[in-house]
Amino acid sequence: MSRYRVAGSALALLALAGCGSSSDGGGAEPTTAPATTRAAEDKAALAAAPTSMESAGGAADDALCFTTNRDVLTAAADGFPAEGEALSLVGNGGVQRFPTGLSLTVSYLDTEAGTAGIAANCAAVPVAAYEDVRVGDPVEFAGVPFKVSEITERAVRLTRTSA
């Protein structure tokens, strides 16, 4: 199974999930702690619609890259091939760019070992890194699941596994 690291909106969502309201411990009504207020503000910011659905590059893409906004997630998913279709990532240092600012690269190919590395960046920030993926391993980008379907000397082919 592959080893992977995920950052960005997933990390922000995990941090938000651990936040809650505090109580004085005496059975009184819960109070809103400053961290909880900040978490609510962060959650609202993540869900806010961006000013544009077009990638401008770099930090200008933060609202497209680090979001829980349904319209953005749908646009990101729509930028990938349909369910059952293949996405080929060239292994010569090429970058595959998507409309909402996500870019995917093959960081290495080892056909002898049958492994590869795939990196994802958005707004110039690493958001996922899969190491030692093999044919059959699952990977996910912008909430869209794929399966590694082929590793060749020149490319990694992914197949989208759901709509």
Image: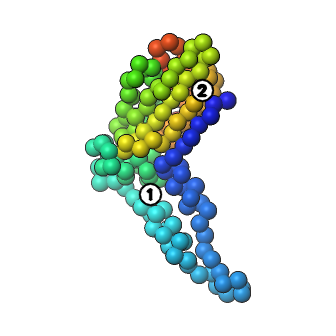
Residue 76: where, in percent of width, then height? 42, 40
Q: Can residue 161 be seen in this view?
A: no
Looking at the rendering, which quadrant does residue 140 occupy? top right
Within 10 angstroms of label 1, few (less than 14), some, or many (20 or more) residues?
A: many
Q: Is residue 37 above or below residue 60?
A: below
Q: Name the residue under label 2.
A: 133
Q: Is residue 45 visible?
A: yes
Q: Nearer the viewer, mark 2 or mark 1?
A: 2
Q: What residue type is labelled 2?
A: Val
Disc 2, SS: strand
Mark 2 and mark 1 residues within 8 Å of each other at the beta carbon = no
Q: In this view, does 139 lie to the left or right of 38?
A: right
Q: Name the residue under label 1.
A: 46
Residue placed at 71% from the left, 87% from the top?
26
Residue 59: where, in percent of width, then height? 33, 49
Quadrant of the drawing holding the N terminus:
top right
Disc 1, SS: helix
Q: How far apart are marks 2 and 1 (CA)?
A: 30 Å
Q: What residue type is labelled 1?
A: Leu
Mark 2 or mark 1, earlier in chain: 1
Within 10 angstroms of label 2, few (less than 14), some, or many (20 or more) residues?
A: many
Residue placed at 39% from the left, 28% from the top?
96
Residue placed at 53% from the left, 71% from the top?
35
Q: Is residue 29 above or below residue 11?
A: below
Which of the labelled discs sits on residue 161, or is there none? none
Looking at the rendering, which quadrant does residue 100 occupy? top left
Residue placed at 59% from the left, 60% from the top?
17
Q: Which of 152 and 44 is in front in this view?
A: 152
